[in-house]
Amino acid sequence: MGLSGISLLTTTYSLILQHQSLLLCLRAKGFGLDLKKDMEGVDYLSDERKKAQFDVEAMKIAWAGSLEAFQLSDRMAKLVANDPAFEKFTRPMLGRKELIKNTLRKAAHGWKLIVDLRLTEEEAKWLRLYIDEPAYTDLHWGMFIPAIEGQGTEEQKKKWLPLAKKMQIIGCYAQTELGHGSNVQGLETTATFDPQTDEFIMHSPTLTSSKWWPGGLGKASTHAVVYARLIVGGEFHGVHGFIVQLRSLDDHSPLPGVTVGDIGMKFGNGAYNTMDNGVLRFDHVRIPRDQMLMRVSQVTREGKIMQSDVPRQLIYGTMVYVRQTIVADASKALSRAVCIATRYSAIRRQFGSRNGGPETQVIDYKTQQSRLFPLLASAYAFRFVGEWLKWLYTDVKERLAANDFSTLPEAHACTAGLKSLTTSFTADGIEECRKLCGGHGYLVSSGLPELFAVYIPACTYEGDNVVLLLQVARFLVKTVSELGYKKPVGTTAYMGRVASLMQNNCAVQTAEGWLNPGAVVEAFESRAARMAVRCGQQLAKYENPEEGFAELSADLVEASIAHCQLIVVSKFIEKLQQDIPGKGVKQTLEVLCYVYALFLLHKHQGDFLATGYLTPKQASLANDQLRTLYSKVRPNAITLVDSFNYTDHYLGSILGRYDGNVYPKLYEAAWKDPLNDSDVVDGFYEYVQPILKQKLRTAKL
Ligand SMILES: CCCCCCC/C=C/C(=O)SCCNC(=O)CCNC(=O)[C@H](O)C(C)(C)COP(=O)(O)OP(=O)(O)OC[C@H]1O[C@@H](n2cnc3c(N)ncnc32)[C@H](O)[C@@H]1OP(=O)(O)O
Ligand SMILES: Cc1cc2nc3c(=O)[nH]c(=O)nc-3n(C[C@H](O)[C@H](O)[C@H](O)COP(=O)(O)OP(=O)(O)OC[C@H]3O[C@@H](n4cnc5c(N)ncnc54)[C@H](O)[C@@H]3O)c2cc1C
């Protein structure tokens, strides 16, 4: 089709949209327009794509981490996108029972592909990601298996892992209870050792001890790792994990003494309701002694407690692992929302038409850029910090295997803090992307409402974000208090220069002066160090440190955020010190890195000014530079989101379509809504017509 053909069609559509009643009339009379056929194959974003100042294919590899990682992810994305079994358009319209059945079907189809195509564990992980539907398999692979791997003995791993990895059993992670989630030491479920029979008796003594929330527990799991208070000889010996069979492997019915079910509907349509979060109660259920996970502590046949030289915190190890994966997931969720909002912002036009010419693309408004581009930069920042955190976790895991526990506190603080920082920002960022898309962003077909509904519990699960920042604060306060005699290392190494960070002030004199990694890092280090030291000084005024900690907790949370933002900024800058091939790739990433850092500096300028590191003039220069940076991002915006390499299936958004063919597809989708199956709505004759036909006798009307 030639250009004149396209413009003719576009004009026709706008006329149609303005005169919808006319179209309804045409439809009713059978004059249907084949919108799909007419607009297929046109790339409405091609002009935008031509503006790119970098090699998109090389950027895709930088985003994926390596050529191999890119190829693997791309293969799995296409495998899912081309398989009609993974259709998800109708998901938000399904009732709960249909929804769960549909999810079970997709999970079974996914497993069949994994087996038939002999996919590796890494490929299978990406396949599940692109299926893009929360399911019991997430918890089976993401928590049940890691819990056994991290807390089981060699013998236990040998017995349980092959069964789990062949999916001959399905497991979940049952820790949270109705009465306690954050406070793990407050759990009430008991596991009492019976020396007569060499068994543990699992019991739920109160209503509040009912397990509540575990994903996959409600309907799918046959087994669970259950966290319970270990009681031996009448004494409490801390909370431990136990492998407990819940349902029959023959007919899936709950075993005697086990009460289990789903906890009910959650926020949003579709969304996380594909997951069977469950409730579980035990009535004196007996399990063999060797089903307590015994890497940390062992209970002998005689009922003796033996401690290995492994710290008790390893019982929390699965959470450290999952928090690390959640940081990587934050960049995926944020980049997805940003991809939708960026493409749509280039298609959407409002105001500014001159001499009958086109209106302004909303992406060209500076306000739109100042809201959108920091989110784009954050998606890249989270991608790189996630990559680093994966490295840190792998390193810790190797050390733990060799009984070196020295880096565990740092790993705990980093995973807890970055999980909190990235999920809170991403949840807000998805909602901002919805607003950036105006009214159409509120349509389910934009993909944003479901993405938001699926994503927001990440601020709560795997540790409430405030509770986790308080864990970071404990770590920071400890680091500050030990400065006199212990050299801080890793992410707190900057505290070792606390004296100069407290004294030196920012030297930046011009807006260009902010384009200096050293100046940026020093600003973030000084702010974080000063906030942590200030908290330490305040705490010292309290006789009871716990009381002081509680009293100052809001300030401590802010100090933790400053520390975590410093980590993200530093890791982005470190990434740029590596060799990053491809024309213009490194330069474009540098722009994004400065956008990320200076956006944070602008947003939190109160901290930077209050700690005395910056003058108002320097803060204002940072903001001037930020405006210039937005202009540098603008020509690359579309190709920067193309570099995420998301298929239209994965994005699940009409507004974010690769070809930008938004209006015809939105229009087409509306007619697929079941409400439009008939012209006269079900219920009209019962409830609407009687009102229309009533003869009012009321005097006033
Ligand atoms: C791929 C999967 C898809 C994702 C789907 C999502 C599914 C969701 C699953 C879940 O939500 S599972 C349940 C998650 N639950 C939580 O995250 C609970 C949060 N609470 C806790 O982690 C702990 O209770 C607490 C807040 C850390 C407090 O624990 P406790 O009272 O025992 O400790 P403290 O006295 O505060 O600290 C003692 C000591 O231990 C250190 N520490 C705490 N946690 C860890 C850890 N995970 N690893 C290493 N070390 C840890 C802490 O720093 C203290 O150290 P010191 O100061 O004594 O040196
Ligand atoms: C979708 C979803 C899936 C989940 N999946 C699982 C699962 O598979 N397995 C599992 O075991 N659990 C699961 N959970 C449970 C989850 O881990 C807990 O909900 C989470 O740890 C938070 O605990 P809580 O609900 O007890 O919150 P609470 O601790 O009751 O938090 C309520 C409020 O109190 C505040 N607060 C609590 N303690 C403090 C404190 N010390 N200082 C200051 N403020 C505080 C919090 O900030 C929050 O604002 C899931 C939850 C959700 C929403």
Image (cartoon, rainbow, N blue to C red):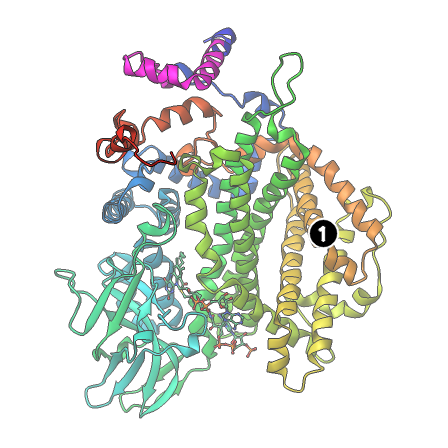
Task: Determine the image quadrant of residue 40.
Answer: top left
Within-10-Å neighbours for mark 1: few <14, some 14–19, many 20+: many
Nearest the viewer among 292 and 630 is: 630
- Secondary element type, mark 1: helix
Asked if residue 101 is positioned above or below residue 353 in the image, the reply reads: below
Residue 498 lies left or right of residue 682; in this view the side is right
The reply to whether the residue tagged 1 has its Cβ within 8 angstroms of ligand 2 is no
Asked if residue 456 is positioned above or below residue 286 in the image, the reply reads: above
Task: Determine the image quadrant of residue 246.
Answer: bottom left
- Residue extending farthest to the left is 250
Percent position of residue 445, x then y: 40, 34
Q: Is residue 21 magenta?
A: yes
- Residue located 80% across and 70% down the image: 499
Percent position of residue 306, x then y: 38, 87
Task: State which quarter of the image contains the C terminus.
Answer: top left
- Residue located 62% across and 76% down the image: 551
- Residue located 20% across and 90% down the image: 196
Q: Tell me where the magenta segment starts and ends, as one range.
A: 8-36
Task: State which quarter of the image contains the N terminus.
Answer: top left
Residue 113 lies left or right of residue 465; in this view the side is left
